[in-house]
Amino acid sequence: MQRDERRRFQQEVRELMRMRRAALTKEEVEAASGEVRHRLLAHPFLAEERLVASYCGRGGEIGTMALNAALLGQGHTVALPRVNPQVRGEMHFYVAEDLGALAPGAFSIPEPPALPENLVEPGLIEAILVPLVAFDPQGNRLGMGGGYYDRLLKRLSGNCLIIGLAHDFQMVSALHPERWDMPLDEIVTPTRRVVLSRKC
């Protein structure tokens, strides 16, 4: 697939998935998010306390606020992203000790305070929960197009478990990735856990 054709295809998928997520009711998002949360909390990799990078879902994405709270309750260290509005595609993770201290950031997404002592080096992250627009059976991920996660995933340790969170309808047959795109190790949806690369 040529680059221009790939870009058109990706944009069409983004528009379709945004429409499908926007059509979900609050109750449907909460139900799907609850199923994903239960599957993740039972994950064998999380049987030990870990440094987990997560996110704050929005716009019909799998919700993570209850999940983040549950991870903290189980003794895990949870880090959340802060976007640098001055540099396209740049974000940093900070330990979120108090979810009540989150405040809207550059895209109105809740972010943790930028305390220097809570800045997380990407190489120390043991598991990362990644939002996505679409995924395929090979573990390829389509994001929003800003490049934030594309840049971050390349800086993680080779042992870091990369888990995409998605609704079942976000799977497509193939995404035709670029050679530099980073695939997911697993995808967790409301109905299943798809394991593509075993790291635990």
Image (cartoon, rainbow, N blue to C red):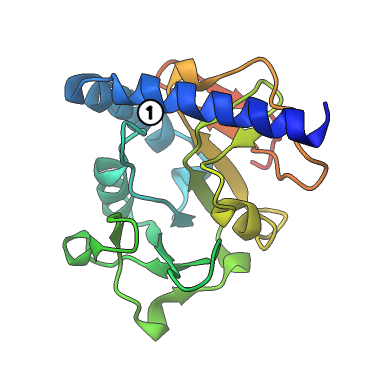
Instruction: Classify mark 1: residues with Cα within 10 Å, few (<14), some (14-19) or many (20+).
Output: many
For residue 50, say whether it is visible: no
The residue drawn where x is 71% and y is 45% is: 182
Q: Is residue 186 left or right of residue 112?
A: right
| Image quadrant occupied by the C terminus | top right
The residue drawn where x is 46% and y is 55% is: 52
What is the x, y in percent for residue 20?
Answer: 38, 19
Q: Answer above or below: position of 51 versus 186.
A: below
The residue drawn where x is 50% and y is 32% is: 133
Q: Amino acid at mark 1?
A: Val
- Seen as rendered, the residue at the extreme bottom is 116
For residue 67, say whether it is visible: yes
What is the x, y in percent for residue 98?
Answer: 22, 65
Count of residue discs: 1
Q: Say what secondary structure mark 1 lies in.
A: helix
What is the x, y in percent for residue 7?
Answer: 68, 34
Q: Which residue is mark 1?
A: 36
Q: Answer above or below: position of 126 versus 118.
A: above
Residue 139, picture quadrant: top right
Residue 181, picture quadrant: top right
Viewer-proximal residue, 151 or 23? 23
Q: Is residue 81 left or right of residue 100?
A: right
Viewer-proximal residue, 29 or 14? 14
Residue 97, picture quadrant: bottom left
What is the x, y in percent for residue 143?
Answer: 55, 40
| Image quadrant occupied by the N terminus | top right
